[in-house]
Image (tube, rainbow, N blue to C red):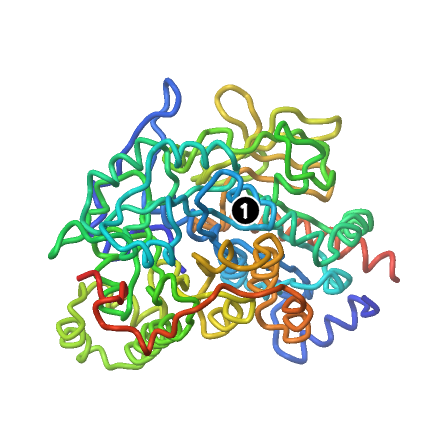
């Protein structure tokens, strides 16, 4: 993949923030290459939701490539109801101090001030997330304005390309967070990847109308046509609860996984965490996966998404 | 392995490879976690089919191995889980070329200033993780490289380490203004704090190919 210039280059030109990290030199900071480059470093890895510094440490020890600092995991947000917001800076600070791996945190959709606060805290990646209650009914954050990179959820290709057009340097499927049911993550990954394959094989004449139908920037549709992949790293999220779930998503074609409630709502979190890390690295080796899946205790208790009321579904948030 | 150069040359002639592609270089990229795909793409551009290495047994047939960028704690853990540590030591011991980029540099160092992960000690350098700060402090800048021609090289530093101490016989190829090395070489081992695979400039990959070529030639000579 070409990581040297922003997709749909015009959007990035002149917007990268420069800041000297030492006297007498002006290296470029917060460039597209650095933002999307960090996501490249996360590939083949597992990003785990944690709510305390101790959990962050367990995640790091298990081999997580990054942790998502939260006050409540999605299944608890779902249970508690009410408005879900950015986490307390004290909690995020505590988790940043506890581990050496990158720390992500969530801002509400469209809540650019929460994102500004996360950037000020030194958060390494911001998840503009449907798991929190949206702050804007029409617009997402203009992510080009930040040095901090962003990951956003998507249920289909148009949504993914709109988020990238707004500056997201990493995409994840939305799945249905906090359920332990993989079905929506599978649906979204297949929808996105299947659509990419379709565009790859279109005639060039068809691409503008396809961009119109998708509601996606034309330059990005062209790039998908040319490269056969998203211009940024693509992870799976939402409903991953076992090593087999993680390997399933990897075999379908994503580049890494987020595990939310699946680790710390399981019976033996350190064991489950390590097993999901191993399964993600060796996703294509059934013998290894059989060994990895043994004796892990109970996975998180699940909720079947297909029996949920529509208004309970977080995946529908985002525009 | 058992193939002699002359036999390989005959094979290449048979499949129409030019003399410049004559050596069947065997380069692998450790594909447990991180940006191994970008390295493989860069080698492909240079006409070398690099292999994704997921099992320690694959090291036996290689002339060169890259440990890519990624999360050093994760990669280090997976190295142990999948039994790579002793194999990597004998890989370097037999003279094959090894290159660590960013997390890879951390993993192969002799010592870290940080409490973890435990490095493998494959090159005599002391390394400090996340030297420049967090992701918002990641940057790119141009550096001159000793022994690499064609002007400055654009280096991308992502939550990058630096070398704070080099042992005897370690050659510094590029350093920061304050003298801290960001690219070093000791014999058949190369380490860079940054990510040449995220640029379009293949010169450091070419440099590594020449290291692997030396290893391959030495091996062919030894194996007769």
Q: Residue furthest front?
A: A80
Give the quadrant of residue A104.
top left
Q: Around disc 1, counting alpha carbons within 10 Å, would you say few (fewer than 14), some (14 to 19), or many (20 or more)?
A: many
Regarding residue A29, the answer to whether it shows in the image is: yes
Count of numbered labels shown in the rendering = 1
Up/down of B197 relative to A272, above or below: above
Q: Nearer the viewer, residue A123 or A292?
A: A292
Residue A209 horizontal side relative to residue A5, left or right: left
Q: Report the residue at 45% width, 30% height from top.
A: B133
Q: Position of residue A282 (x, y in %)?
A: 61, 66
Q: Pick the quarter of the image with the C terminus of chain A.
A: bottom left
Q: Report the residue at 31% width, 28% height from top.
A: A19
Up/down of A133 relative to A316, above or below: above
Quickly name the residue at label 1.
B71
Q: Nearer the viewer, residue A292 or B58?
A: A292
Q: Name the subunit of mark 1.
A: B
Q: Pick the quarter of the image with the N terminus of chain A.
A: bottom left
Q: Position of residue B101 (x, y in %)?
A: 57, 44
Give the quadrant of residue B32.
bottom right
Residue A249 horizontal side relative to residue A58, left or right: left
Q: Report the residue at 25% width, 66% height from top.
A: A312
Residue B39 horizontal side relative to residue A148, left or right: right
Q: Report the residue at 35% width, 68% height from top.
A: A227
Q: Position of residue B169 (x, y in %)?
A: 74, 29
Regarding residue B139, the answer to whether it shows in the image is: no
Numbered disc 1: secondary structure: loop
Up/down of A42 relative to A314, above or below: above
Q: Position of residue A313 (x, y in %)?
A: 27, 67
Q: Nearer the viewer, residue A218 or A136?
A: A136
């Amino acid at each position: 993949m070409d990581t040297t210039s922003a997709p749909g280059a015009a959007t990035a030109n002149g917007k990268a923030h420069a800041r000297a990290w030492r006297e007498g030199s002006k290296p470029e900071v917060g460039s597209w290459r650095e933002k999307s480059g960090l996501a490249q470093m996360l590939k083949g890895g597992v990003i785990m939701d944690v709510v305390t510094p101790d959990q962050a440490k367990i995640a790091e020890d298990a081999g997580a490539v990054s942790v998502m600092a939260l006050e409540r995991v999605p299944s608890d947000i779902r249970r508690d109801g009410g408005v879900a917001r950015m986490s307390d800076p004290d909690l995020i600070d505590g988790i940043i101090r506890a581990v050496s791996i990158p720390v992500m945190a969530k801002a509400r959709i469209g809540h650019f001030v929460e994102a500004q606060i996360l950037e000020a805290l030194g958060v390494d990646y911001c998840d503009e997330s449907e798991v929190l209650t949206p702050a804007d009914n029409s617009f997402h954050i203009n992510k080009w304005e930040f040095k901090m990179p962003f990951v956003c959820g998507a249920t289909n290709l148009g949504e993914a390309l709109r988020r990238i057009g707004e500056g997201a340097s990493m995409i994840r499927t939305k799945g249905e967070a906090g359920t332990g049911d993989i079905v929506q993550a599978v649906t979204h990954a297949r929808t996105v990847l299947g659509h990419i394959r379709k565009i790859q094989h279109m005639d060039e004449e068809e691409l503008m109308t396809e961009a119109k139908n998708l509601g996606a920037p034309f330059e990005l549709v062209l790039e998908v046509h040319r490269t056969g992949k998203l211009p940024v790293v693509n992870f799976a999220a939402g409903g991953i609860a076992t090593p087999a779930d993680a390997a399933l998503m990897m075999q379908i074609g994503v580049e890494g996984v987020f595990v939310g409630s699946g680790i710390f709502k399981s019976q033996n979190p350190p064991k489950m965490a390590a097993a999901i890390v191993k399964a993600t690295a060796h996703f294509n080796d059934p013998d290894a996966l059989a060994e990895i899946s043994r004796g892990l205790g109970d996975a998180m208790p699940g909720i079947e998404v297909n029996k949920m009321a529509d208004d309970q579904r977080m995946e529908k948030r985002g525009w | 392995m058992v193939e002699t150069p002359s036999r390989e040359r005959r094979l290449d002639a048979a499949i129409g490879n030019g003399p410049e592609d004559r050596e069947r270089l065997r380069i692998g990229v450790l594909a447990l976690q991180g940006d191994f795909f970008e390295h493989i793409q860069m080698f492909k551009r240079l006409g070398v089919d690099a292999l994704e290495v997921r099992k320690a047994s694959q090291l036996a047939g290689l002339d060169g191995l890259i440990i890519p960028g990624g999360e050093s704690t994760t990669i280090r853990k997976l190295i142990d889980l999948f039994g790579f540590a002793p194999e990597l030591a004998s890989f370097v011991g037999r003279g094959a070329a090894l290159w660590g980029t960013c997390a890879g540099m951390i993993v192969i160092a002799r010592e870290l200033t940080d409490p973890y992960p435990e490095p493998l000690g494959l090159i005599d350098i002391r390394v400090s993780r996340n030297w420049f700060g967090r992701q918002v402090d990641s940057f790119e800048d141009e550096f001159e490289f000793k022994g690499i021609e064609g002007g400055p090289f654009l280096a991308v530093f992502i939550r990058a380490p630096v070398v704070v101490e080099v042992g005897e016989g370690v050659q510094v190829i590029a350093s920061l203004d304050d003298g801290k090395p960001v690219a070093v070489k000791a014999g058949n081992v190369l380490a860079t704090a940054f990510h040449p695979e995220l640029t379009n400039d293949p010169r450091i990959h070419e440099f590594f190919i020449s290291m692997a070529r030396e290893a391959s030639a030495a091996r062919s000579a030894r194996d007769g």
